[in-house]
Image: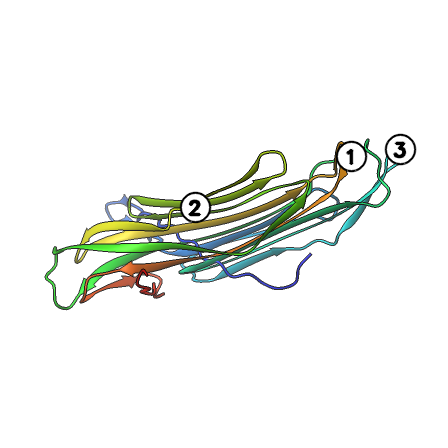
Amino acid sequence: MFSRTVTLTALLALSGLGLAASTASAQAIYFGVETDAETLGYTGCYNSATYLPSATFVSSVADPAGATLTSPYYGSMFADVGASAEAQQPVLHAQAISHTHSINATSGFSGSAPYGYGYAHSFDRVTVKSGSLPKGTPVTIVFGNQVDLNAWSYTGLYDGYIDMSLQIGVGTAHSRWSASYLYGVTASQAPQITVQTTVGSQFSIDGKLRAQAKTFYVDGRTFGGDIHADATARIVVLDIPAGVTLESFSGMVYPVVPAN
């Protein structure tokens, strides 16, 4: 279905593990990455998933060959799906593709809708630093939840979405695009999170990007469909006080991109 890799960013923070006993403690996991690429719908589809704690990059690809499905009474249809994902602080990329078309099918043809699903997730923890402000000084930091739709196209019998959720400390931002041949197209975007914190404090950054693409075989006299969902999400700093910096546990840098 596709050959190029994808680039995405997602972030999640896990709290430190408590003491197991008075003389022993568990090692806290403060950063990591996770990806999942799933395909389903016909023989040969498969999944690829990886979770790497204390890591800064991971990728997954599921790209089975297309298949012809034949009914002894209702003819043949062709299906092809694919999915991929990459996670790296602070960039996530997810892609999903699904395609079906009739070879010589009739309206009685039936079968489970084939689909692709890509998921990218990254998590981190940061410390608020300053060489000029004393510890405990209140500061306000604004983060951007930027999502670029590299491909978002659909035709025929389709259903899918692109979904990005960002949590920073207790603040959340959620952006979602969905498309369905039955229910229409929707879009909802939350582009930023404002964090009220202090110099010396720590907080978590958690991002998850999902893309799903599904097509159907037949509905009435309409056969097949095509949908391509491909997005890149970036976690950036839109506004931070002069003299204040963020030091991440992962060692990755969250770029400062002033809002227009």
Residue visible at 24% across and 59% down in the picture: 127
Badge 3: few (under 14), some or many (20 or more) residues near its Cα, within 10 Å?
Answer: few
Q: Where is residue 223 in the image (x, y as percent from the top left)?
A: 76, 40
- Is 156 left or right of 211, judged from the image as shown? right
Q: Which of marks 2 and 1 is in front?
A: 1
Q: What residue type is labelled 1?
A: Arg
Task: Classify residue 127 as left or right of residue 64.
Answer: left
Using the image as rendered, state which of residue 135 and residue 234 is in the foreground. 234
Q: Where does label 1 land, which residue?
A: 221
Residue 150, by quadrant, is: bottom right
Quarter of the image for the C terminus: give it.
bottom left
Q: What is the CA distance from the residue labelled 2 to the residue labelled 3?
A: 44 Å
Circle nearer the N terminus (3, 1): 3
**Kind of residue at disc 2:** Ser
**Numbered mark located on residue 73 in the image:** 3
Discs 2/3, front: 2
Residue 25 in the image, given as x and y percentages of width and height: 29, 50
**Residue on which the image places disc 2:** 175
Question: Which mark's residue is nearer the viewer, 3 or 1?
Answer: 1
Evaluate whether residue 231 shows in this view.
Answer: yes
Tag 1: Cα neighbours inside 10 Å, few (<14), some, or many (≥20)? Answer: few
In this rendering, the count of numbered labels is: 3
Instruction: Give the answer, above or below, for where 221 lies relative to 1.
Output: above
**In this picture, residue 195 sits left or right of residue 217:** left
Q: In which quarter of the image is the N terminus?
A: bottom right
Q: Residue at x 28, y 58 (%)?
A: 126
Q: Residue at x 43, y 62 (%)?
A: 56
Q: Which mark is residue 37?
A: none
